[in-house]
Amino acid sequence: MNCLIIDGNKESCRPLERIVKQSGHLKLVASCGSAAQAEDVFLKHKIDVIFIDELVQPERAAGFLNYLQFKKPYMIVVRSGKRPTDHAYDVNTTDFIMKPLSGAQFRKVMNKVIFG
């Protein structure tokens, strides 16, 4: 499965990049700093899973998904606080992962994505 990471803070997304690269199920296509950069990548590659930091305006990143003809990707919101922001619910989020990330959290979310 191809995945895309969207996080405005390059340092905070490094743990997720490492976990994704170690997983046997995902291929990291790109790690973007904004929704605008992600749109370019998304239109050039088939993306199955998007990991997006809740502070990157997921509603903007999801806005262009409504215009796509093929299957929409799973949207995993990465959050810093215990409670997701309200707009995280507006983008048909598959699940949430809390920072700091752990392999156990990642496996739980990916099991939901892969096995339903």
Image: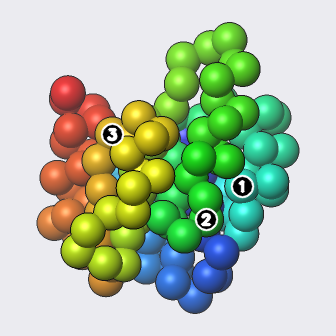
Can you say whether 72 is above or below 99 in the image? Answer: above
* Residue displayed at 31% across by 78% down: 81
Disc 3 residue type (three-letter): Thr
Residue kind at label 1, given as amino acid type: Ala
Cα distance in 3D space between marks 1 and 2 = 7 Å
Tags 1 and 2 touching, CB below 8 Å: yes
Picture residue at 33% right of the left edge, 63% below the top: 84
Identify the element where label 1 is drawn. Answer: helix
> As displayed, is residue 54 above or below residue 82?
above
Task: Tell me which amino acid carries mark 2.
Answer: Val
Is residue 45 at all visible to an observer of this figure?
Answer: no
Coordinates of residue 82 in the picture (x, y in percent): 23, 74
- Does the image show residue 46? yes
The answer to which quarter of the image holds residue 106 is bottom left
Pointer 1 residue? 35
Left or right, residue 6 beside residue 26: right
- Tag on residue 94? 3
**Residue found at the very far top of the displayed protein:** 69
Label 1: how many residues lie within 10 Å, few (<14), some (14-19) or many (20+)? many
